[in-house]
Image: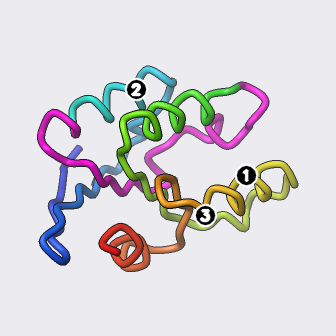
């Protein structure tokens, strides 16, 4: 795993770069949050390829548990990728509602995430 730092409008944003799944369990998400927060980041970008597909099955509660911690610590998270592959209406609604806020966003690209997180 590599952490790429982007500085936009004097805001440091961490982008997780990896070929592997970084978040396999809720604890992995909490560890990532803690490690990056400790390094001074309060804005993070991660791609869907680095998150287990189980995250997008809302019935198991993993997404809620992880995203609640990000919100509690006021760390903004942008998850990037192609969300059209998820056909379940509940995940579509979840993404739509999350994107209305500022802390958790589901976006299609790193460029879009940087723009959102730097505003």
- Residue 52 placement: quadrant: top right
Tell me the distance, in whole angstroms, between the alpha carbons under discs 2 and 1: 21 Å
Residues rendered magenta in the picture: 36-60
Q: Tag 2's secondary structure?
A: helix
Q: How many numbered dots are placed on residues in this image?
A: 3
Q: Does residue 41 lie above or below 93 as drawn?
A: above
Query: Which residue is tagged 1?
Result: 94
- Mark sitting earlier along the chain (2/1): 2
Query: Which residue is tagged 3?
Result: 99
The 10 Å Cα crowd at callout 3, few under 14, some 14 to 19, many 20 or more, is some
The 10 Å Cα crowd at callout 2, few under 14, some 14 to 19, many 20 or more, is some
Residue farthest along the top direction in this orientation: 27
Decide whether residue 7 is among the magenta residues.
Answer: no
Identify which residue is drawn at 39% across, 27% down.
Answer: 30
Query: Which residue is tagged 2?
Result: 28
Q: Quadrant of the C terminus?
A: bottom left
Label for residue 23? Answer: none
| Disc 3 versus disc 2: nearer the observer | 3
């Amino acid at each position: 795993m590599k952490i790429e730092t982007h500085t936009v409008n004097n805001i440091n944003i961490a982008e997780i770069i990896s070929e592997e799944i970084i978040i396999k369990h809720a604890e992995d998400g909490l560890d990532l949050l803690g490690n990056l927060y400790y390094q001074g980041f309060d804005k993070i970008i991660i791609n869907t390829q680095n998150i287990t597909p189980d995250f997008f099955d809302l019935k198991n509660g993993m997404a809620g548990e992880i995203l609640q911690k990000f919100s509690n610590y006021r760390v903004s998270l942008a998850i990037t990728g192609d969300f059209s592959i998820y056909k379940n209406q509940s995940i579509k609604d979840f993404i739509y509602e999350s994107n209305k806020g500022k802390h958790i966003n589901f976006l299609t690209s790193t460029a879009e995430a940087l723009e959102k997180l730097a505003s």
